[in-house]
Amino acid sequence: MRPFSIVAILLSVAAAYYIYLPLPSTISEPWKLMFMDSILRGVMHVSFLAHNLGLSRPFDIAKYAASWDEIKGPQSSPVIRVTETSFGGVQAQVFESTAADQEPPLKRGVVYFHGGGWTLGSGKMQTYFLQCWSMAEELDAVVISIEYTLAPEARFPDQYNEAIQASKHILTAEVLSRYSIDPKRVAVSGDSAGANLAAAVVQQMALDNSASIKFKVQALLYPVLQALDFNTPSYQQNGHIPILHRPLMARFWLEYLNGDPRLVTSLLANNHSISTPSQEIAAAKAKTNWTKLLPVAFQKSYKPVFPLHGDPKLLEKLPGLLDVRASPLLAETEVLKAVPPAYIMTCEHDVLRDDGLMYATRLEEAGVHVTVDHVEDGFHGCLSFAFGPFRFSVGFRSFRSYILWLKENL
């Protein structure tokens, strides 16, 4: 019995060591978050270990684990009709409120892009499925969840191109009429990498003179908008905070841009931000200059991180780092002037917090009306945790704020 007890104690200590993370007291439900994050980290560690051993691609096991959470087949109810279809050749799920089907009025429409670092996730996952279902019900709307192709089967700009194709097809009189959507009340929205696609799409669509129907508003949930600076105050403050750790975000960028995973360390050191930049790079860096774009309260005591020498070859290997289609924060002011009003949710305990705040500043300077909804106890992805097996109070609150804004502005 004694050896068994010793092994049990050692395993318990190891599990506690793996689960425990020193989290700020201001974050929502820290112990529950630690436990949830330990599961997600475990899946990622196994996934990367399998890749390092040559057994699989980097995110294959993580994708397989996520697939267990998918809802199989469209499931409808008396109030929400769910169908699977495609728009411009891109797969999608359509959630239609049937509350007013007897006398069909024109409804709000929301085109939604899920998160997951362009690599993981699906609108069929329980969290996203229930989120889009609830959005359709709460807004009496038609919510279209886009199933863009994930990396590595697709790389930038493939996901962007699919997002554009689907959006253009949806924003036609024929499609909107088919679903009784008011062409004057269509929003584009998304979270994290999905918000990146939403922001990039709305910029392109705003400039497309061939499109007679435009998005009325954009709603971006903790968006990822740039990869030139991995040392903004929020990256420095929240580098080890669940559920999006700083190295993982760099890994997602490399997967999206078809870069070598071994470049993570160089990105985190800002080695791609060379000390003597070209005119193009200098212009891009000005659009990510957090010392001027961030409110002082969020800069705190953090200092910019500059490489001693930098590595100009990094930008040659990863040209997408300077491509506005991948980094919407780099858009020219003239482009930003054309986009519709924006809702941007940011979370205090999120590496991407400053991406959203800097974008809000740039939009406001361009004359765009912006609502910043900053969640003080929020962490990355918190809104999705209003649904599914891990539910957080901050998830319910953030979802209510998001829905309220859409009700008042769409």
Image: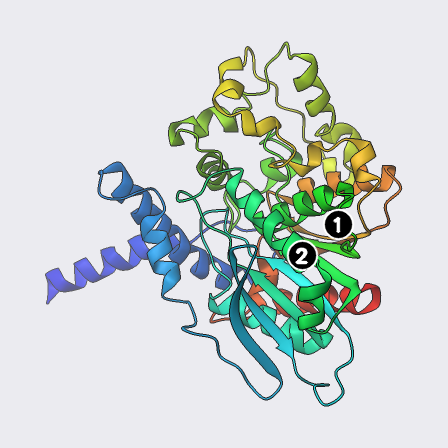
Report which residue position mark 1 lands on.
211
Q: How would you rate the neighbour count of disc 2 (Cα within 10 Å): few for under 14, some for 14-19, many for 20 or more?
A: many
Mark 1: secondary structure: loop
Q: Position of residue 341 (x, y in %)?
A: 82, 52
Q: Which of 77 and 386 is in front in this view?
A: 77
**Residue drawn at (82%, 42%) of the image:** 338
**Residue drawn at (60%, 50%) of the image:** 165
Note whether residue 303 is visible. yes
* Number of numbered callouts drawn: 2
Q: How would you rate the neighbour count of disc 1 (Cα within 10 Å): few for under 14, some for 14-19, many for 20 or more?
A: few
Residue, far right: 367
Mark 2: secondary structure: strand
Q: Where is residue 217 in the image (x, y as percent from the top left)?
A: 78, 56
Per the rendering, the mark at residue 189 is 2
Q: Marks 2 and 1, how far apart in space?
A: 19 Å
Q: Which amino acid does label 1 sit on?
A: Ala
**Residue drawn at (39%, 60%) of the image:** 66
Q: Where is residue 63 in the image (x, y as percent from the top left)?
A: 37, 54
Q: Nearer the viewer, residue 402 or 103?
A: 103
Is residue 406 shown above or below 209? below
Q: Is residue 142 left or right of residue 55?
A: right
Q: In which quarter of the image is residue 138?
A: bottom right
